[in-house]
Amino acid sequence: WLQLGQQVRLGLEENLVACPEGAVTALLHSVGALDEAEGEMAALELVKMLHHLVASGGLPALGVKPQDGGEPWRQQWLLTAASLIRFAYLKWVQVPQDSSSKEATLPPILPALQAHNSFVFKQTVGDFVRSGVYDLALTENSVLFSEAFAFMAFCRMHEVDYVLESGVYKGVSTEVWSLFAKDVSAVDIFISNEANERLSRRSNVRLFEGDGRSLLPQLLTEQPGRKAAIFIDGPKGELAIRLALSLREHPQVAFVAIHDMAPYRQELGKLGAFFLSDESWYQEAYGHLDAPFKARPDMPAGGTMAFL
């Protein structure tokens, strides 16, 4: 079923519309093979896509709902499959988002660690400022320096010398990690020319094209015994969280940081997050590190970095 499932997945929406019964059957039969061949995250992504398109009405042409007027047998078959897909999504993929209302003051995700984290940051902020980070060229949609500083500080605390990254974009965060890590391995589905050019002068950076969900575990096993930290900026959302939770179990991994996590703040606390970069006390103390970005309102950047 593996090759058939992979083929159906390539044109998922078109195949679902053309033959929903055949497409869903092929994909559900192939989930186990995908898990074995491409890793757990590939299987979870497939469940998420099927939930969106089949179980949640993301593809109205399927006519899953009874009022859509499809043939009765097709309605019942798809409704049954949709129920199973929805259960799998809610059980193994979904990470609930917070309510839309945002607090004016964001407390520490783990108050008991605030004093400890504050001490760690005070010991390392000078090294960060002197690292050369302010000499780097800025681009849009990169990490803020306050976020990068927190990552660097926890690397120093854990004596990390190997950083792995999933989601390179234009290579800004990758270049920042190269300033303080002995080695950096960065993965993206497609490495842009801008990223290649930016990072070509960094001899301690290796770039890999491919799926970070499968490549990151491989890269870890190639460097046995090294203490590593991981930064995930792709995949996004709940799939990023699931990937982080999986990688966190690896004995070499000191911590995992995930970008753009503001909507998941409450749930991340339940899952073991020990720091978020948008905590009010932290921004009051170290938000000044982002001065170059604040001087460029035409250049959107940053998000909330969560540490697990």
Image (spheres, rainbow, N blue to C red):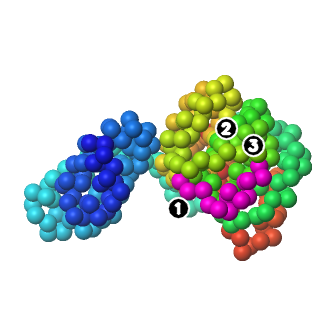
Q: Which residues are magenta?
A: 189-202
* Magenta stretch encompasses residue 74: no
Judge whether residue 25 can be spotted in this image.
yes
**Mark 3 Cα within 10 Å, few/some/many (few <14, many 20+)?**
some
- Tag 2: amino acid: Ala
Q: SS for tag 2?
A: strand
Residue 65 place in picture, x, y as percent: 21, 63
Q: Earlier in the sequence, mark 1 or mark 3?
A: 1
Residue 184 place in picture, x, y as percent: 70, 42
Number of the label disc, if any, that sits on residue 100: 1
Residue occupied by mark 3: 204
Q: CA distance from mark 1 to mark 3?
A: 42 Å
- Tag 3: amino acid: Asn
Front position in the image: 50 or 213: 213
Front position in the image: 280 or 90: 90
The answer to whether residue 123 is left or right of residue 43 is right
Closer to us: mark 1 or mark 2? 2
* Magenta stretch encompasses residue 197: yes
Q: Earlier in the sequence, mark 1 or mark 2?
A: 1
**Mark 1 Cα within 10 Å, few/some/many (few <14, many 20+)?**
few
Q: SS for tag 1?
A: loop
Q: Quadrant of the C terminus?
A: top right
Residue 35 place in picture, x, y as percent: 38, 38
- Quadrant hosting residue 168: bottom right
Q: Quadrant of the N terminus?
A: top left
Front position in the image: 207 or 69: 207
How many discs appear?
3
Q: In the image as oriented, which residue stretches furthest toward the bottom?
A: 298
Residue occupied by mark 2: 229
